[in-house]
Image: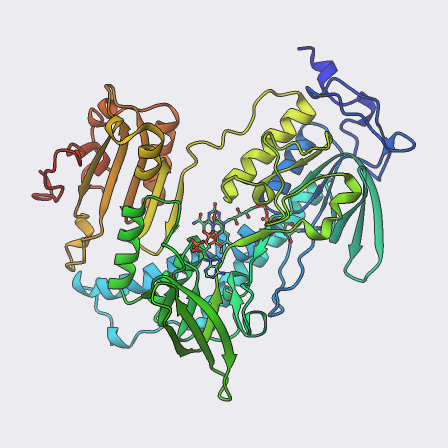
Amino acid sequence: MDLSQICLNKSTCNKFGNIRKVTSKPTAMTNEVIQSSHEDGTFDYDLAVIGGGSGGLACAKEAVNQGAKVAVLDFVTASPQGTKWGLGGTCVNVGCIPKKLMHQAALLGESIHEAVAYGWQVPDVNKIKIDWAALTESVQNHIKSVNWVTRVDLRDKKIEYINGLGEFKDPHTIVATLKNGSKKELTAKNIVIAVGGRPHYPDIPGAKEYCISSDDIFSLGYPPGKTLVVGAGYIGLECAGFLNSLGYSATVLVRSVPLRGFDQQMAAAVTSEMEQKGVTFHHRTVPLSVEKLDNGQLKARWLNTETQQQSEDVFDTVLLATGRYALTKALNLEAAGVTCLSENGKIVAATEQTNVAHIYAVGDVLEGRPELTPVAIHAGRLLARRVFAGAPHHMDYENVATTIFTPLEYGCVGLSEEAATERYGADNIEVYHAYYKPTEFFIPQRNIRNCYLKAVALRAAPQRILGLHFVGPVAGEIIQGFAAAVKCGITMEQLMSTVGIHPTVAEEFTRLNITKRSGQDPNPASCCS
Ligand code: FAD
Ligand code: NAP
């Protein structure tokens, strides 16, 4: 392909300065010719991105690298409890980053106790406790530094950052409502919707008045105390896990099953470990109401949907983790002609292109895609390369690895045993599995009952691996490496002929040799067998 044809119209490339008009003349820069319906055929920007989170920022930066003139709008509306944050989206401010830091705080707390068995002299180890204010201050300071660096990065890259709530006026025009209420209008040849999502609040009395969500927990101005977590997905389990390990009582309401959609044997290992560490689970329950008592505590009531029995208890904090909805309502999508799903506001866009040719969507706003930061980033970058450099590559949403930090981690890539069975039939898959003993769990003797891994493979030689699952320490670090192997089509034969690194927990994958079908005991004989 002739590169001079696939770049933007020459006059629009590599000059940034003040807002200037971009011609709308169709070019050969994309596979589909983008037809402008804008009245005078000129635009302020080659690309406007609505949403300055993981996906939007990655797309904007890559578009600039490819010579485009770009604006990014980002605006955070306060949570019902009044929490707000800065530039960078969910991951940086109220998602992955503060969650990982609290996970680390939880692991450190556990390590202090274990250190004694290794000879560390810790005075009054049973009296140690977390200083919540100090923890949240450190976490928030880090976030603020990331907000600042993100802003500087946009300025350095000459990306116009508009701290305003964007909505469509027409298919090429966006109106941003700024903090002071004033409006700013801009036009763009291409538009990317990367508005992400926010926590869903169940429709029960007291939800919005008294409950918090993941939007609030990482900057909560008081120690959460005894906490009820509603929801047993990623967020519910992760929050309950770190709160419990930080020393706060945590109870989880599970509506159907924990980690629905994940391999249920692994999910059971996760919740069993959490239970053994002190988390309480109420299965098959839905919340009914949350009421504030005179002493400031919260009385929560819930229903067991199997027995129809109602229960109640008093908590200091109720954290709702009942899923997230896409933030498309405020976008006035009708004005652009973009369609979204009425039930969750999500946009269906197989190759990130919406039903309007020049309007795209990336990240959590997409229907049926993993809601994960690296997914949003990767899709955003590839999209910018396709639109502004004619690159052919599309996002591959298959075999995306993920980890749940509970705080014993569960990492996985590919199909669960259930999904593989459904897709290929039980007779056509082979499941290799093992319990294992991490060396670091011997001193002090720690519970190893939930240190379990499995490989789900096709039964016929050479047994291509369909899914890898691992519950144990640093599962995320381990699965990341194996994810590349799965992406390359690794087989059981190849995995079994890989030499392990001893003594690590990752080497357990190379030692797998017992199939479920054989009925053999998957428990380890000794550390080095
Ligand atoms: P976002 O990052 O949500 O960014 C969207 C931005 O657009 C926001 O700043 C929003 O305020 C803004 N916006 C919305 N509407 C408008 C508008 N009309 N005008 C202007 N701006 C607007 N993922 C992982 O991979 N690993 C993890 O460990 C992990 N942990 C998580 C923990 C929690 C508690 C949560 C909530 C999420 C976690 N995620 C994790 C998911 C990850 O954060 C998201 O998948 C990712 O942030 C999605 O990126 P995005 O660009 O689609 O949207
Ligand atoms: P989720 O995984 O979809 O879990 C939502 C939970 O809430 C489910 O257990 C669901 O139960 C329950 N629920 C929903 N409505 C309810 C109601 N009305 N009453 C009681 N329970 C209800 O959503 P999430 O935990 O909010 O996470 C959202 C996304 O963020 C995830 O899909 C993930 O991609 C991303 N994330 C990633 C990480 C990570 O990578 N480590 C961490 C956090 C978040 P049912 O199963 O019965 O529906």
Here the colouring is rainbow
Q: Is residue 252 above or below residue 49?
A: below
Nearer to the camera, 434 or 2:
434
Q: Quadrant of residue 84?
A: bottom right
Q: State whether residue 115 appears in this view.
A: yes
Direction right: furthest residue: 40
Residue 219 visible in rendering: no
**Vertical position of residue 2 compared to residue 521: above or below:** above
Residue at x 73%, y 31% (from the top left corner): 358
Q: Indicate the position of residue 10 as horizontal and vertical percent values.
A: 80, 21
Residue 489 position in % (x across, y down): 35, 23
- Left or right: 312, with 370 as reference point: left
Relative to residue 7, is residue 208 drawn left or right? Answer: left
Residue 106: image x %, image y %? Answer: 35, 62
Q: Nearer the viewer, residue 464 or 422?
A: 422
Outermost residue to the top: 1
Q: For this rendering, which residue is in front, 207 or 297? A: 207
The N terminus appears in which quarter of the rendering?
Answer: top right
Taking the spot 39% from the left edge, 56% from the top edge, the residue there is 256
Q: Quadrant of residue 395?
A: top right
Q: Who's the residue at 58% across and 74% down the image? A: 209
Q: Is residue 182 above or below residue 52?
A: below
Number of numbered labels in the structure image: 0
Q: Quadrant of the C terminus?
A: top left
Residue 446 x/y as whole percent? 18, 58
Q: Quadrant of residue 493?
A: top left
Q: Is residue 36 left or right of residue 77?
A: right
